[in-house]
Structure formats: structure tokens, C-alpha cells
Amino acid sequence: MFDRCFLMHKYIRFNFIDFIQSQMISKVKPILEESMMTLYCNSVPCCFKVADLGCSSGPNALQVAYDIIDVVDNISSSFNREPPTFQIYLNDQFQNDFNNIFESLPYFYERLRQEKGEKFSPFFINATPGSFYGRLFPSNSMHFFHSSTSLHWLSQAPKGLAKETGLVNKGNIYFTNTSPSEVYQAYLDQFSQDFNLFLKSRAEELVRGGGMVLTFVGRDETCDIITPWGLIGLVLNDMVSESLVEEAKLEYVNMPRYGPTAKEVKQLIDAEGSFTLEKLETFKSRWDEGLKENGNGDFVLDTNVRANFIAKYVRATTEPFLTARFGEGIIDELFIRFRKKVAELLEEVILEHAYLVMFMTKK
């Protein structure tokens, strides 16, 4: 019975994550098309080598690969050229379920054959496990990198907030409007270190003129910092006051993620120096984005329904992290309370994520 419940919950968790990823991939596709056109006009090799970094293992794991193949094929047709051979690498952490992707490859191949015809250019798909905060490929071997909703995850919680530093993000698991400036700086420092290593690694691996399209959660510096992770911190504080959570456990728990501003990202790209930033855009997405697609397509106005939807997908993305630090026993109660706080906020403000999407080419 336990195994059955666990598997069902795991399915629901990945279903929500896949849904959010699908929304972002769809929104960014016009920029992907623009970037492919830019690269194609410069030069297209006989074998076009592409990597999707942070591909996960759900239904969207092959969607980016399909979009890139489809876009390049359409551009090739418009120029009266043969499309290149495609070598596509799927990257994620070592524990990613790559076998699940491999099992879906026959259906992926069949879909392309039906849509593109039997004479379509060859394409080959491989897995490359490992952290993208470091080298993954040989020098000057790749033509294009894509990453969606991954780079806001840090390689670790901010070093500046480690227990031995004595700096405590008291009562929070993320930085908020009320956090000391030192806490914000610790998060920015960790992101800067990680993103700089990411850029240096990709610069080594890309050929000259190669490109990247990156999408990840950012921050609008003109707005108050209201995030799901900040709300989780408030709920945990309430539970500490009721002796449901140990205060000592909360003191040194910090989410290993950071939403940078567009200005911060631009400064880091300029400072690293390997890339020309061709495009950098910010777009907003409601916390309950996609809920309107259920039913008849009208936007759902019921606050409790919207709050429940938000609580489910936030739980999907944070539960493993929270369970490892506070134990499984508090999770249900934590998200019941989280849902109530979200419902209250929905009555007062528009809850939105800011996403950054950028296209850059190697100098």
C-alpha cells in the first residue's frame, strides 16, 4: 500500500513539474527560432551538435530536441538546403532517470519519420549525465546549448550562510524584503560563482559563433520580493512557535536557488567576457499559470482552487528538499498552511514569477 501511494505521489509531483516546464518551453520557442536563424545564417555544420542542459526525464525531455530539429528543418527548407545531421545530447544530474527517456525514443523517432518523411536527415540522441556547473563536453565541439527552468538552482546553498560563518538567515529559508543585506549578498555571491563557472565551461565547449538560449526564474527589482519559498519560511516559523518544527533545524536551512535580476545577469555575462548577449528579455508568469487551460479554457477565479493548484506544484518542486531537512511528518500540515497563506495573498496582490530568457553567442 505504501509503495502504491508513493508511486502515485511521485507521478503527481513529476506531472506538475512537467506542466510548468512545458509552459516555459512553449513561451520561449519564438526566441529559439530567432536564435536558430541567426546561427544558420552564420554557418551550419554538416553535423549540428546540440545539448539540452537540465532536461529532466518526463514528457518534456525530448520536446526541446524536437523543436530544434523542427526549426532547423524548416529554415533549411526556406533556404533550399539539406538539413544537417543532428547530434543531440540530453544532460541532467547523475540520478536522473535517463532510462525513462530512452524508452520513449522509438515513439519520438516514429513521430519525426511521420512528420518529416523517411528521407529526413539522420539524428542521434545521447545522454550526458553530470552537473552543468563544470565541463561536460570536449573543447570546441558544440554548436548550441539550451537550458530551461534549471539555472536558478544553485550548486549548493550559499556558502556565506554556512553554519560556521555565524550568519543566520533567521526565520527564513530564502531571502525576502526583510532579510539583512548580508543574506542577499550571500545568495548573489553563490549565484555569481555558479553562473560564471557555467559560462566559462560552455565557452570552452562551444565553437566560435555557437550559441545558447537560457531560460530561468529571475526577479523584478521594481517589485517586492514575494516568492513561494519566502511563504514556506513564514509557515515554518509559525510551526516553530507551535513546537511542530525545531527552531535549530530552521536556522541553517537555505534554499539552493536564486532569482537574479536582468541587470545582475547582464553584468555577469559582460564580466566573464566570452559571449555577446544578443537578446535578454523578462516575462511574467502568474503562480497559477496554466490553470485557465483546464475545463473550458476560461480563467479560474475561485481563490481556493487557485491556491490549491499553486500549493500542489510548489510541493512538487520542494518536497524532496524539505523532507530531507524537516522530515516527512510535517509536509502535509506545512502545505495545508501554505495553501491558506496563498489564498489570503491572492485576495490582495497579483502573484507572479519573473522569468529571464536570453540568447548569446560565443565571441
Image: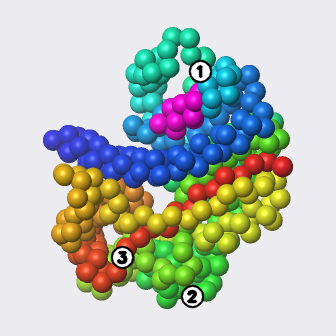
Location of residue 33 with respect to 88 vertically, above or below: below
Quadrant where the image shows the N terminus: top left
Q: Amino acid at mark 2?
A: Pro
Is 336 in front, or is 107? Answer: 107
- Nearest to N terminus: mark 3 or mark 1: 1
Residue where numbered disc 3 is placed? 350
- Which span is picked out in magenta? 63-74
Helix, strand or loop: magenta stretch: helix
- Coloring scheme of the render? rainbow
Residue where numbered disc 2 is placed? 180
SS type, badge 3: loop
Where is residue 350? Give x, y as percent. 36, 76
Location of residue 358 with respect to 186 vertically, above or below: above
Location of residue 200 with respect to 248 vertically, above or below: above
Location of residue 205 with respect to 247 vertically, above or below: above
Task: Say which residue appears at 60% left-offset and 16% top-offset.
Answer: 122
Residue where numbered disc 1 is placed? 123
> How many dots with numbers?
3
Is 237 in front, or is 298? Answer: 298
Where is residue 199? Give x, y as percent. 73, 53
Is 218 in front, or is 159? Answer: 218
SS type, badge 2: loop
Where is residue 144? Give x, y as percent. 68, 39
Contact between labelled residues 2 and 3, with CB atoms less than 8 Å apart: no
Where is residue 60? Give x, y as percent. 43, 39
